[in-house]
Image (tube, rainbow, N blue to C red):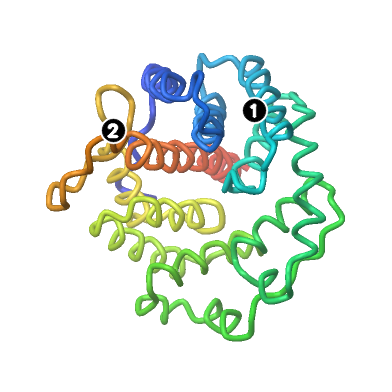
Amino acid sequence: MLKTVPLSLSAEEAVITSSYLKRLSDGSSNLTLVAQSLFARCCLAGLSGSALNADDLGAEAIALGNRILGHPQPGQLDMDPLLLIEIHWRLKAFGIDAAPIRALLERIAPELLAQPADTQRVGRVRLIASQLTQLGFAIRQAAPAKQMAAKLKSPEKWFAASAVEMAEIADHLLADQRPLDGLTSSILSLIALAELRNYRIDLGCVLLRAVRRLGEPCPESTDALNFIALQRRRDGRYGFPNQFAESPEPGDDQHLRIYVPLTVNAVWLFSVEAECRQRWQVAVGA
């Protein structure tokens, strides 16, 4: 048994964060921001006791999908397909089918298959392929490159990996849905804590999502989750600017550059944590 449990996100806090994200994205021409906001609010809507309306989110998803489908140059939007897949998954859990989002996924699938073999072996691409396969698309998931496959089997070597390599490792683990034992869970959580100490919140959250989805509860992951929870601000956003970095250029929007990405990663992690905690409770009860 753990001596501590992760700090939870209350229903009131979820509403405040949702309002913060919606305020930024409403009427925005930045479709990446709109997608980030919608995805994060879908995560918040799935939390126990949430007062967010899933039907409203479904309507927003339809509007977003139509805006992307109608964009004259959708390839230049630089949008992460994983966000669209996650939006689809979460709306589906609410019994909502946003047809335009599904249409976008139907475009992504053949584009992924057309990628070069080396590209298809990349962790993020394999994760997207895995998600699309689970949704019923006829996608073949490439195996990781030999060097990466060997690294995935040697968690003791992860301590020496770079931040880029660790993000790649997390994507591969999630793509393969490979269970993590107690030792591997602790190793990945310790690395996440080290990244959080360096204020790489995005990477820390990625590693923790892998631990909570695939691994076992451990004190290190709980400490890391609490670190993320303590990044919360009164207006619902997460994160603090680097006080030692140069001041942002005039007109630079710190919300889009700093707070929205950190907030999205935080609520995504809390959503995964809530899902996994429920699964563990069921397993223990059984």
Residue 47 in view here: no
Helix, strand or loop status at disc 1: helix
Q: Is residue 107 above or below residue 54?
A: below
Determine the residue positioned at 65% across, 40% down: 84
Determine the residue positioned at 33% across, 25% down: 236
Q: In which quarter of the view is residue 256 placed?
A: top left
The quadrant in which the C terminus is found is top right
Q: Marks 1 and 2, how far apart in space?
A: 27 Å
Q: In which quarter of the view is residue 92 placed?
A: top right
Within 10 Å of disc 1 (Cα), the crowding (few <14, some 14-19, many 20+) is many
Mark nearer the N terminus (1 vs 2): 1
Closer-to-camera residue (2/148): 148
Closer-to-camera residue (161/121): 121
Q: Position of residue 190 (x, y in %)?
A: 33, 64
Closer-to-camera residue (65/145): 65
Residue 14 in view here: yes
Q: Is residue 180 above or below residue 55?
A: below
Q: Residue furthest front?
A: 72
Amino acid tagged 2: Arg
Q: Position of residue 283 (x, y in %)?
A: 60, 45
To which residue does mark 2 refer? Answer: 232
To which residue does mark 1 refer? Answer: 64
Determine the residue positioned at 67% across, 55% down: 128
